[in-house]
Amino acid sequence: MSLTRRDFARQSAITGAGVALAGTVGALATAPNALASTESEDGAKDGHGNGHDGPAHSHGGVGYGPLLPDPDGILALPAGFSYRIVTYSGRTKLESGEFTPSNHDGTATFDGPRGATLLVNNHELAGPRANWPHPVPLTEGLVYDPAASGGCTVVEVRGEHVAEWVGIAGTATNCAGGHTPWGTWLTCEETEDKAGVNGMTKDHGYVFEVDPSDRRANRAPKPVKALGRYAHEAVVVDPRRGHLYLTEDAAGPNGSLYRWTPPHGFRHGRGKLRTLADDAGVLQAFKCFDSGGRFVDDLARATRTGTVYGVDWVDVPDRDAKSLSVRKQFADGQVTRARKLEGMWWGDGGTYIVSSYAREESPGRHDGQVWFYDPGRRTLTLKVLIGINPDPSVDGAFDSPDNITVSPYGGLVIAEDGSGVQHLFGATDSGRTYPVARNELNIGTAEAPSYSEFTGVTFSPDGKTLYANIQEPGIMLAITGPWKRQKRG
């Protein structure tokens, strides 16, 4: 049943401008620019929102303190924390002898055999294989399109031992993706290349399922065409209702958020998605409206945290985009859009959704939003709004969130993908933010330093290790230390 504009307006009037409809998932920010400030462990900050040493405040205990420079020039961490390099493109090798592929992206962890941790790691490699010195190897039986350079690797960590092998090859621009409740990984192609474009021999822009625990299940890769063909970014699964939610990172026009509803009688499970017919279920794009019943064309119009929109869903006419990109099949006024829809993570009974930034192509500008969609209430609530960072080259403020995970210690941990300094940073339920790590690997020059984005932020199943990637050249890191429950602040 759809949530009509009239219903939402009536409920919003009863509950006070709609904010109460968000339930009790916890506001992650209380004011614009909330994530443009950083908090050190003592809770003190200077007038520019930059953490510094100082006397303890009553809201102390947020975060882990200032980041300490790394003598090895890779990762700055708080005191008491350490990191380990798990894989490094061009240095570590797969079981088959080839080097670890480059451009690490979305990652998830799974319980492995005999106490091991399994990770599936996307490799965001676009276009022909000749473009990359370390593409995903074309392992026999695991190749979708032999012309494509991307794919996934599976990494097994058991103590000091690390093994890595190919999960899928011959896919393109594998970006954020997402894990499933049944223990598999959904890898998403962030491209719309068709056969004959960029040297491809097959159409791309699909979602594929990868099983980290069963290598045989990954043979003869088959795209899940029921989920549509477009510039996929991330995907989450509603474990109660069976819906899949998918973000689209595209412009001209901006992309949208999609929901796939399974066909009647379908039961999720390992390998079940690949058995679906290409037109199985219903794929829809979201359509938002405010408490007054007014259509919202773009999420960038929201300028206050706590903003709540009602959500309806509109059927996608041609999910395989045979002649026209999915997002272009909707006229103005039919669906809501957003620039740089990026990472998602299921938690608190719904999904957190990142819009990394908005610029001239949007009706408003920002350096990041995090939304929460509550499927039971059919509402979308703005939890985090990041104001424009005036100087990303200066350490202190955060901007351009991308991959995201819900932390077992409360709140979120977010990977930064902006210009200038790059961080992993945390956000408590009340909006306090704090640095977790800083990328110190300069891939530019001394005169013009450049730092790659962080990707693939995810905790181990036991919550003791935070895994994250430096996308270029492609480094998977395992971070350990005195994790603690974060106060609301």
Image (cartoon, rainbow, N blue to C red):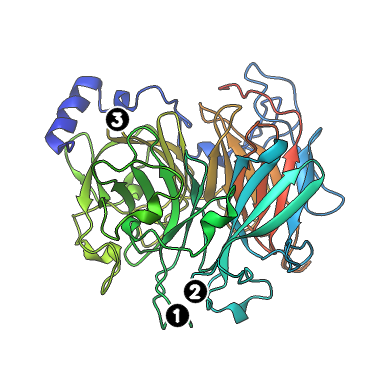
The residue located at (47%, 47%) in the rendering is 368
Which mark identifies residue 183?
Answer: none
**Residue 257: % across, % down:** 34, 50
Local crowd size for mark 2, using a 10 Å CA cut-off: few (<14), some (14–19), many (≥20): many
Do the numbered discs 3 and 1 sit on residues whose CB atoms are within 8 Å?
no
**Residue 162: % across, % down:** 76, 50
Residue type at tag 2: Asp
Instruction: Say what secondary structure mark 2 lies in.
Output: loop
**Label located before the other in sequence (2 or 1):** 2
* Residue on which the image places disc 2: 145
Which residue ends up furthest to the front in the rendered image? 216
Looking at the image, residue 337 sits to the left or right of residue 384; the answer is left
**Residue 49: % across, % down:** 61, 37
Residue type at tag 3: Gly
Residue type at tag 1: Thr
Count of numbered tags: 3
Which residue ends up furthest to the top in the rendered image? 58
Q: Give the Cα distance between marks 3 and 1.
A: 42 Å
Q: Is residue 301 visible?
A: yes
Judging depth in this view, the residue of 381 and 214 nearest the camera is 214
Instruction: Say what secondary structure mark 3 lies in.
Output: loop
**Label located before the other in sequence (3 or 1):** 1
* Residue on which the image places disc 3: 376
* Residue on which the image places disc 1: 201
Q: Give the Cα distance between marks 2 and 1.
A: 6 Å
Instruction: Say what secondary structure mark 1 lies in.
Output: loop
Do the numbered discs 2 and 1 sit on residues whose CB atoms are within 8 Å?
yes
Q: Is residue 391 visible?
A: no
Judging depth in this view, the residue of 398 and 102 nearest the camera is 102
In the depicted structure, whether residue 180 falls above or below residue 463? below
